[in-house]
Every structure is written in C-alpha cells, then in structure tokens.
Amino acid sequence: MSRASLSGFIRRRLGKQVCLLALTVIVLGSQNAAAQDTRSLTSDMVGQWELSTAGRDKTCVVTLKNETSPQGLKLELEKGCSDALPFTKAIAAWSVKGLDIVRLQDVRGESVIDVTEVESGIFEGRREGEGIYLLQNLAAARALSKSTDQLIGDWAMMRESGKSICGLTLTNTETSPENFAVFLKPRCDPLVASFAPTVWRLERGELLLRSAKGETWRFEADDNAQWRRVPDSADPLILMRQ
C-alpha cells in the first residue's frame, strides 16, 4: 500500500470512529436528558392533587409520594374517593411514563388513567365510555373555586369616566365545564347589547365573557379591585361590583 493510500485509509477509519463517537454522545445525551425530564416531572408531581370530572362536580384528593412500592410510587386517596369516582378503587400506585405522561395504575402496573399536561399545573386524561378527567394542583383548584364564588353576583360595566353602560349578573349556573351563565339587565348600551355575552369563566387570572357567537371579551383585575378590559384602549371598559 502506497503512503497516499495508507494515509487515506487512516483518515477514513478515523472519520468513521469520530462519527460513531459523536453518535454515541448524542444517544447518551438524549437518554440522559430524557431521564432528567422524567425525574423532574416526578419531583414536580409530588404533593396533593385534585382528581375530578371535567366539570369538577365530583372530586377526589390524591396525595402523590416519592416513595417506591412493589406496585410503583406510593400514593394516598382521601376517604370518599371511591364513592365520588368509582374507578379510583383500582388505583394502587403512580408513575411517570415517557416524558410527559402521569399514570395512575393498578397493582399490576396497568393504567387506570393516564393524564398529560394541557395547561400549567393542569393534567387531562380520558377513560373510554366515561369522558374527560382532570388532575390539578389541589391548592390551585381550591383557589379557582373560591375566586369563582367570590365573583358571583351583580356587576356594572362602566366607562372609565364612571358612566354605567350596562348591568349584568354573573351566576354559578354551570353551562359547560368551567363556564357559567351570565345575564344582561335591561337598557344596556348597544355596544354591550350587540355583544350579548351568555357565559363567563375565570381563565389564568382573567375574567372572560363569551357570546353565543364565540366572541370573547377579557378583563384583568386592576389595583382598585375592579376588572378592566384588555387589551387596553383610550376609553376602556371596567367591571365594578354592585
């Protein structure tokens, strides 16, 4: 073999070894990242959670622990869970599957329900023939419920000048999961009357009014314990409790 041929052979062998080494580093890096993501999700999930129907009319408190058992990671279900949600009788442990699936599982490790995060701190899963269930941080779920209760009642929609242009009533009558009926009082300004909201809800700290046509007005709480429509405008609308 000539010197040039030997040199080319060495370069090719070294090139292959470098590629194999780079591929090994990438694979190991991906595996390590996946393991870190799984550990991170497991750590984030430890604590108390509310498992509920989509409308939160039936709820169960689940305490997820970072302690192992023969069935998986340990958990505790509050007394009364099996009455509210009968399928919880089969839940014996929990685990994290893949990168983003939290599994509530039976003694064999089979899924009773798998949930994935759809919003920060809110996980959603489906049971065939039953529908959607939510798993959300217990403190956040109770804070949302408390905040919703505090908003029920009569409100006035006003211009920033203080002129009232419409009266409305926020009710606790649920029309769909997390959506509640709202009613306008007589003699509303045409702007509000044409909008004609039919439901309201709280979403990520905002109060939403939504019409039957799907149009949505968003309001944020301001420093004066009022709710101001966003995005802001030269002549903003303000919601004030009556």
Image (tube, rainbow, N blue to C red):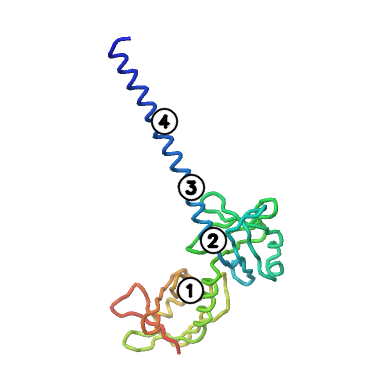
**For discs 2 and 1, the disc positioned in front in the rendered view:** 2
Residue linked to disc 2:
45
Sequence-wise, the earlier of marks 3 and 2 is 3
Q: Residue 223, relative to residue 216: is it above or below?
A: below
Which residue shows up at 65% across the image and 64% down it? 76
Residue linked to disc 3:
34
Sequence-wise, the earlier of marks 2 and 4 is 4
**Dots 4 and 3: beta carbons under 8 Å?**
no
Distance Cα–Cα, label 1 vs label 3: 34 Å
Q: In this rendered view, identify the residue nearer to me: 41 or 101.
A: 41
Q: Is residue 234 left or right of residue 226?
A: left
Identify the image quadrant of residue 30: top left
Mark 2 packing: few (<14 Cα in 10 Å), some, or many (20+)? many
**Dots 2 and 4: beta carbons under 8 Å?**
no
Q: Residue 137, relative to residue 127: is it above or below?
A: below
Q: Is residue 184 left or right of residue 96?
A: left
Sequence-wise, the earlier of marks 4 and 3 is 4
Residue linked to disc 1:
202
Distance Cα–Cα, label 2 vs label 1: 24 Å
Q: Which mark is residue 20?
A: 4
Sequence-wise, the earlier of marks 1 and 3 is 3
SS state under label 2:
helix
Distance Cα–Cα, label 4 vs label 3: 21 Å
Q: In this rendered view, identify the residue nearer to me: 214 or 223.
A: 223
Sequence-wise, the earlier of marks 2 and 1 is 2
